[in-house]
Image: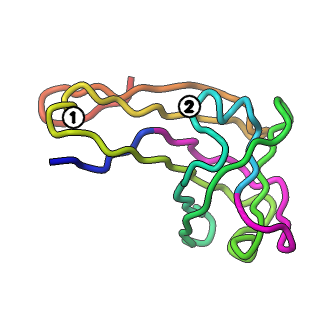
Amino acid sequence: MRREVLRAKIHRITVTDRNIHYEGSLTLDSELMEAAGMVSFEKVDVYNVNNGERFSTYVIQGERGNGACCVNGAAARLAEPGDLLIVASYAQIEDGEIGNHRPVIISVDSQNRIGQIKGIEEEGKKFIFR
């Protein structure tokens, strides 16, 4: 059996812009995408911490090192500049791989610069952040 699990997450990234008239997607600083192992056109789920909105879209690369997080297209109506988002990518893995799977968690500062890259390790029956 295959299960869908969290592969990577960019935690509490700040929306820097929105563009309702763009075709769609979420533009992210390419440095953040690289750190999270995300690739252009990869599907992501986005959770808006400020208003509770949730949506799925795909990511595209923005300029490296500029801290971009621009919500595009119809989804731009679900976020405002300054809102905090969680951007999550998932993968399907076999049951036998679950014990070795560790998602990548990227924490960012107020300028969307990488603050910390975390892995999750199993300790007993609960997961803890290291």
The amino acid sitting under disc 1 is Ile
Dot 2: within a 10 Å radius of its alpha carbon, few (fewer than 14), some, or many (20 or more) residues?
Answer: few
> Where is residue 35, by image quadrant?
top right
User: What residue is shown with label 1?
Assistant: 98
Residue 117 is left or right of residue 110, and the answer is left
Residue 29 percent across, percent down from the top left: 76, 38
Q: Residue at x 74, y 34 (%)?
A: 30
Compared with 104, 16 (above or below) is below
Q: Residue at x 76, y 42 (%)?
A: 61
> Where is residue 117, by image quadrant?
top right
Number of numbered discs overlaid on the protein picture: 2
Please tell me which of labels 2 and 1 falls first in the chain. Answer: 2
* Disc 2 element: loop
Magenta-highlighted residues: 8-25
Residue 67 percent across, percent down from the top left: 80, 39
Compared with 89, 24 (above or below) is below
Q: Nearer the viewer, residue 64 or 47?
A: 64
Q: Quadrant of the C terminus?
A: top left
- Please tell me whether residue 19 belongs to the stretch shown in magenta: yes
The amino acid sitting under disc 2 is Gly
Q: Residue at x 64, y 27 (%)?
A: 115
Q: Residue at x 81, y 45 (%)?
A: 68
- Please tell me whether residue 59 belongs to the stretch shown in magenta: no
Compared with 124, 54 (above or below) is below
Residue 27 percent across, percent down from the top left: 76, 51
Which numbered tag is attached to residue 113?
Answer: none
User: What residue is shown with label 2?
Assistant: 37
